[in-house]
Amino acid sequence: MRQASELVEGYRTGALSPVEATQEALDAIERYDEQVNAFVLVDAEGALAAAKESEARWHAGTPLGPGDGVPTSIKDALWTKGWPTLRGSTMIDPAGPWDEDAPSVARLRETGAVFLGKTTTPEYSWKGVTDSYTYGATGNPWDPSKTSGGSSGGSATAVGLGMGVWSLGTDGGGSVRIPAAFTGTVALKPTYGLIPLFPPSAFGTLSHAGPMTRTVRDAAALLDVVTGFDSRDWSAMPTPGRSFLDGLDDGIAGLRIGFSVDLGFVDNQPEVEALVRTAVGVLESLGAEVTEVDPGFADPIDAFNVLWWSGAAKVLSAYTVDDRVDPGLRRVAELGAAYSASDFLDATAVRMDLGTLMGRFHERYDVLVTPTLPITAFPVGQDVPDGSASPDWTDWTPYTYPFNLTQQPALSVPCGFTGAGLPVGLQVVAPRHADALTLRVGQAYQAATDWHRRTPTLEAQ
């Protein structure tokens, strides 16, 4: 499977064609999507027409930008002009109107990216797996009977199977990193505000957009495209002054890495822990100064749940709720509706304290490295693994949601496979605004390993 950088260089020299690359992506969708259900909308005719326009621009030497002709999918949580954005819900009218792009989608359109279609999400992206009454369940590229994770599971499965090179997801508590870890792909939750969002999420400032790819280099290239100030987002950061590809290959010699195998409160599957420790050994062999240390915070799950469940209540408050709504979403929305303003402010205080603690942690350590998840993918169609003591998805995602609370950049890269052939992810967390550093660590690891080069052996049906 080619990287975006390889495609763009091939377009520039004439060795590759956007039409050819787009057809390859569409062929992969045709071969695999019936098994994994990664897409809710595929516009083959529109994609090929856009690819032909891109090809003409490259032949004329006038590409629109660094993503011109790159086959791309969009999670069905982000507005796309001309296509419905149903968010996995039966409550949204497909008729629209759909006359505006989300900021990140607009940036992709401006660079000439080829839009293949929209990818699956659970209802309103509320949980850590991808299934809904509207779309059904999304399977894992390595074993379709296992979950892809979520809520950006369709995007992760799409890039994992070559159904497009780039995808754009969202992450409110781990929703790009969870499926990246489960599918052996790469995803970045950037610093909050770096990728503008519109319309604003009902889950507030927990929610980020993020690139989903097969390699760190592609994630950096996609981040270059989708960042940039947008006045529709009141919290949008200024447009970056340099490319995230600059310095990507500078290595990590002398970097201070704090490694926590469990954050002080997590139980990992033994194979996950062993693979993550091996991965950290690779980082140390590259010259990083690794210290095994916990950041020193208690599990903030209760505070996160107050904020997230309150968002769920806000989502459903606009509708007459019936049995067409995910029962899990109904349950947590009822919990969220019972919280008081004082409860919300108490949770916000926990969030602020955690942000301060992590700020001080990064005075001593450049990055924090953890597992992305303590487990591997479990059966598709379940919100939680077999034997879980809790019905809540947050119970099995303890490494991801803390860094939505703090708004730090967090990257997941594949770091191995279990004996059952399921991927495991390594998470790299940096201080706010140090997204380039997060990517540099991930790139150093990928340059020294080949896990990201492995491809699923799913047979076409």
Image (cartoon, grey):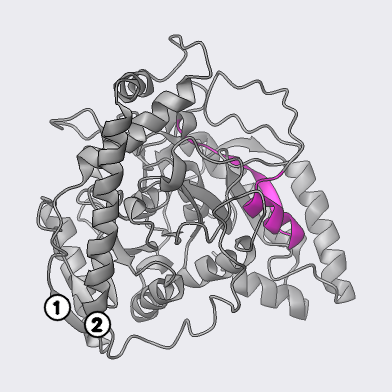
**Which residue occupies 30% across, 48% down?**
401
Q: Residues within 10 Å of mark 1 (few under 14, many from 20)?
A: some
User: Can you say which quadrant of the picture contains the N terminus?
Assistant: bottom right
State which quadrant residue 310 falls in.
top left
Please state if 18 lies on the left or on the right of 154 as rendered: right
State which quadrant residue 454 falls in.
bottom left
Looking at the picture, how far across and down is residue 221, in whole percent?
Answer: 58, 70
Please state if 276 lies on the left or on the right of 307 as rendered: left
> Tag 1, which secondary structure?
strand
Q: Amino acid at mark 1?
A: Thr
The residue nearer to you, when weighing 234 against 52, is: 234
Where are the magenta residues, as a range?
101-122
Q: Amino acid at mark 2?
A: Arg
The residue nearer to you, when weighing 246 against 61, is: 246
Looking at the picture, how far across and down is residue 83, in whole percent?
Answer: 71, 36
Which numbered tag is attached to residue 256? 2
Please state if 138 lies on the left or on the right of 357 as rendered: right
The residue nearer to you, when weighing 160 against 436, is: 436
Looking at the picture, how far across and down is residue 5, in whole percent?
Answer: 61, 73
Numbered-mark total? 2
Q: Is residue 102 magenta?
A: yes
Please state if 302 lies on the left or on the right of 310 as rendered: left
Cβ atoms under marks 2 and 1 closer than 8 Å: yes
Q: Is residue 449 magenta?
A: no
First in residue order: circle 2 vs circle 1: 2
Which numbered tag is attached to residue 291? 1
Camera sees residue 27: yes
Looking at the picture, how far across and down is residue 436, in whole percent?
Answer: 46, 75
**Which residue occupies 13% across, 61% down?**
296
State which quadrant residue 450 falls in.
bottom left
